[in-house]
Amino acid sequence: MYEEISSNQRRSWFLIIGFVILVGALGWVFGRLTRFGYAGFVLAVVIAVVMAVGSYYNSDKVVLAMSRAHPADPGQFQYLHNTVEGLAIAAGIPKPKLYVIDDTAPNAFATGRDPEHSVIAVTTGLLAKMDRLELEGVIAHEMSHIKNYDIKFMTLTVVLVGVVILLSDWLLRSFWWGGRDREEGAGGGGFIVLMVVGLVLAILAPILAQLIKLAVSRRREFLADANGALLTRYPAGLASALRKIAADPEPLEAANKATAPLYISPPKQRGLTGKVKELWSTHPPTEERIKRLESMSA
């Protein structure tokens, strides 16, 4: 479990470092080729940060409203409250607020900007279809997302993606506007090469940025699985829960494209298969997650 946690933490930060390098390269090319110069790069960062911060502070309210979640009554859902309270003590964080979603599909998600402002939402299907150990595994997974500050971590990737998209769009438009005055570099082979590099970056960088963001998300899911197993000391509970959730035929009616990535097991993607599906998924393949959890029990 400890090896799995350390490995996923390292890989998460390696991906973020690669992301920053991509943003830096795009910003440098943007500054050289456009009339905006490096001031445009700074402007793109400011815009992306402002948009991400607004989402960061209000995302929990929006997600809960979109999911039609309601507070879990302590009398009606006493066992759920007791389970979450015990795991919160084990994790060393305040007990998250609890919400229930009236949906027959078994699933759950966590949201909130930090452990002091966190929420765990579970479906009624999860409460009905999981046994005690499986429910503890799911709650521990979501608790680990909160403890690991994954909302904050993923907000960083959203900022980086936003910067890349803005710079790429402005760079492409600058080619139509004529770009920077080119007396200094007109006819120079180096300047032409830089323009070609800029065009390629402007086209490919948004795609690379999205792929890196999704790779970071998958790493954080593996990390939450390992941390959740460490909390319960029983990886088989979460493995069994993931197997049940994946096999359940009930559609997750409460989810939509915006909220689906938050769930422990998002709705299946149509039209994608194999490696392409893995690349564009926010979650690792369920089979791989189960395999890793079972290896921790060995």
Image: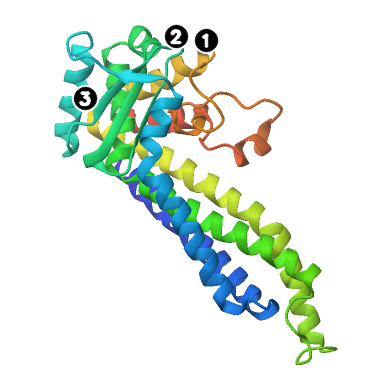
Q: Which mark is residue 84?
A: 3
Q: Is residue 11 visible?
A: no
Query: Which residue carries the number 1 mark?
Result: 250
| Amino acid type, mark 1 | Glu
Horizontally, is 243 left or right of 129 in the view?
A: right
Residue nearest the viewer, comparing 71 with 150:
71
**Residues under numbered marks 1 and 2 in contact, where contact means CB atoms less than 8 Å apart:** yes
Q: Which mark is residue 260?
A: none
Residue nearest the viewer, comparing 137 with 80:
80
Horizontally, is 152 left or right of 210 in the view?
A: left
Quarter containing the N terminus: top left
Query: Which residue carries the number 2 mark?
Result: 104
| Amino acid type, mark 2 | Thr
- Label 1 crowd (10 A; few <14 / some 14-19 / many >=20): few
Q: How many marks?
A: 3
Residue positioned 27% across, 36% down in the render: 118
SS for callout 3: helix
